Amino acid sequence: VGVIFASLAASLDGYIRSSSGDMGWLNDSMRRDEDYGLSETMTRAGAYIMGATTFRESQSMFGGSATGPPTYVVTHAAPADAPPGVTFQAGNLGELSASAKAGTDKDVNVFGGGDILTQTIAAEALDELTLALIPVVLGSGTRLFGDVASETYLRLMDCQSFPSGIVLLRYERAS
Amino acid sequence: VGVIFASLAASLDGYIRSSSGDMGWLNDSMRRDEDYGLSETMTRAGAYIMGATTFRESQSMFGGSATGPPTYVVTHAAPADAPPGVTFQAGNLGELSASAKAGTDKDVNVFGGGDILTQTIAAEALDELTLALIPVVLGSGTRLFGDVASETYLRLMDCQSFPSGIVLLRYERAS
């Protein structure tokens, strides 16, 4: 049985994307000779949990025809026709995480930030959070964490800094 | 001549205070035998820069009668009478930082988070930012960083993790 994990890069002020969508802040900071472990995300993931907005964006980026790993989309407005392998669900993130875990032998990736990530943490369903903290203040953009009533403690498992100034933080769910 | 610095503790999701004002998340995480260097803030500061809300709160907490270090309050609604040692100013954070620096031989502390902190960083006026990252997700509260159009790179000077799971990050202004 796999774990539920999220693996993201964020600015120091907690944005995973700038307002303009420009990725310079990320690409200019990361260095090829530094291993942040973010690439393993793709190979680890046997299923995805994401929000409706992230799903729409990934559909338009990668196309809707190819059947990828099972994808669970959190939405209150499920379309009548779901693409193959896609499940729309309005339930809470605890239930959704259990469904996603049951649907694969590999790990489940919570893809994207905001309320989905914070709700998964608040439901104590996120087993692992890896965060690459970029030494830049963006001032605005898409937030890593959402506004969710919660107070959830995590356990720091690893902290590593690189010459680029990027800090890699790895947290696990506190039991 | 001193430097402009900020020294704060924040939750992993970037809050310096919970919605309720309860400090349990901070007090339960910090350990007496771990030195986060936050206490030196008081002894270092020869002047303060803060926002109007923070000023009002500190006045009601510590009283308005005692004359402390020079305090520069960023506000667009300056009262007619300023307490001794208090300067109300509507200018940008670059100018304000220069004024504050000129008013003391010691360092200047940007006190409180939100727009003031982010504007000071965006104006490239903040020389030093020390951040104690607490391993807790609060979900809501008073934000460390504000919504300010900017994209400002910092330089990581030091990164230290403690058995409590607190990570101490020290950044300097990138030149």
Image (cartoon, coloured by chain):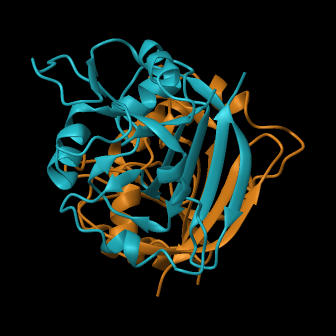
Chain colours: A cyan, B orange
**Residue at position x 30%, y 68% in the image:** A23
Quarter of the figure that contains the N terminus of chain B: bottom right
Residue nearest the viewer, comparing B91 with A94: A94
Picture quadrant of residue B19: top left
Residue B152 is at least partly visible in this image: no
Q: Is residue B161 above or below residue A5?
A: below
- Where residue B63 sits: x, y (%)? 53, 34
> A8 or A148: which is nearer to us?
A8
B91 with respect to B118 (left or right):
left
Q: Is residue A112 above or below residue A73?
A: below
Residue name at image x 45 percent, y 71 percent: B100
- The location of residue A63, given as percent across then percent down, is 17, 50
Residue B104 as seen in the image, left or right of residue A112: right
Which residue reaches farthest bottom?
Answer: B175
- Residue reaching furthest left? A80
The spot of residue A88 in percent (x, y) is 25, 21
Residue A3 placement, left or right of A46: right
Q: Position of residue B135 (x, y in %)?
A: 64, 38
Q: Residue at x 42, y 50 (%)?
A: A14
Question: Which residue shows up at 21% across the image and 61% down it?
Answer: A21
